[in-house]
Image: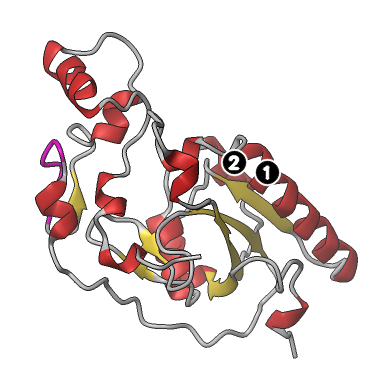
Amino acid sequence: MFNLKNLPFYDLLPVGVCSFEKIKDDLFECRAKNRIPNDAKSVIVYLFPYYLGEEYYKNSNLSKYAVPDDYHKICGVYLEKAASHLKEKYTEYSFEYFCDNSPINEVYAACLSGLGVKGENSLLINKTYGSFCFIGEIITDLDIPVEEKETETCLRCGLCEKHCINNALNKGKVDENKCFSAITQKKGELTEYEKELIRESKCIWGCDVCQNICPMNKNIK
């Protein structure tokens, strides 16, 4: 029987598995969707914690996730190594890894895999590392037996919605047009209102307000 402890980097990174059947009807239309193995059975989900401690962010005008090296490169290296290791061990099966440009709902898959709960800000919250985690996954046609968890929610304290600087949160849904993090990453000319938001926040890339205020992000590693 497949043992999750045998997964690459099991002792280093949070990792879990869910059934592809559970998430297949909620796929995003993107180029990466074509890489999903035929007759996919399982999704191996990895978390990549990036919180460094508050002393690293003093006087920073960037979101916390932008402080470490580019996560596409770091997470991609780990996922590629994990997929290669699994291909060598299970030669009859396919293992395709995805990082950022994933065709699946990563937060939902991570919740099903037992790696955390979904916050009202739509982010995954892990009990050890909080919401400061990148998500990557490997989709495979290997049928990995798993005991999937029911998806749960956060404390629902409402603090993230209350403190959102542009009122982008509403009962667990995010208005991408209002999300300040999305505004700072928009291509093209910003409106005067959007420019003023950036001036007032003093943050030029991303936004951590809903994460910084979250009580589930206290005392995280």
In the image, which disc is placed on residue 74?
1
Q: Is residue 117 above or below residue 3?
A: above
Q: In the image as oriented, which residue stretches furthest toward the bottom?
A: 1
SS of the residue at dot 1?
helix
Q: Residues within 10 Å of mark 2 (few under 14, many from 20)?
A: some
Instruction: Determine the image quadrant of residue 69.
Output: top right
Start-end of magenta stretch: 165-170
On-image quarter of the N terminus: bottom right
Q: At x 76% / y 67%, what residue is drawn?
A: 8
Is residue 66 within the magenta segment?
A: no
Numbered circle sitting on residue 195: none
Q: Nearer the viewer, residue 147 or 183?
A: 183
Q: Which residue is mark 2?
A: 71
Label 1 amino acid? Ile
Quick check: 145 left or right of 121?
right
Which sits in the foreground, 35 or 168? 168
Using residue 105 as the reference point, say whether residue 211 is left or right of it: left
Answer whether labels 2 and 1 touch (C-beta < 8 Å): yes
Q: Amino acid at mark 2?
A: Tyr
Q: Nearer the viewer, residue 63 or 151?
A: 63
- Residue 73 appears in which quarter of the rendering? top right
Q: Secondary structure at mark 2?
A: helix
Structural distance between the alpha carbons of marks 2 and 1: 5 Å
Residue 140, image x, y percentages: 67, 64
Could you tell me residue 97's position as x and y percent?
66, 52
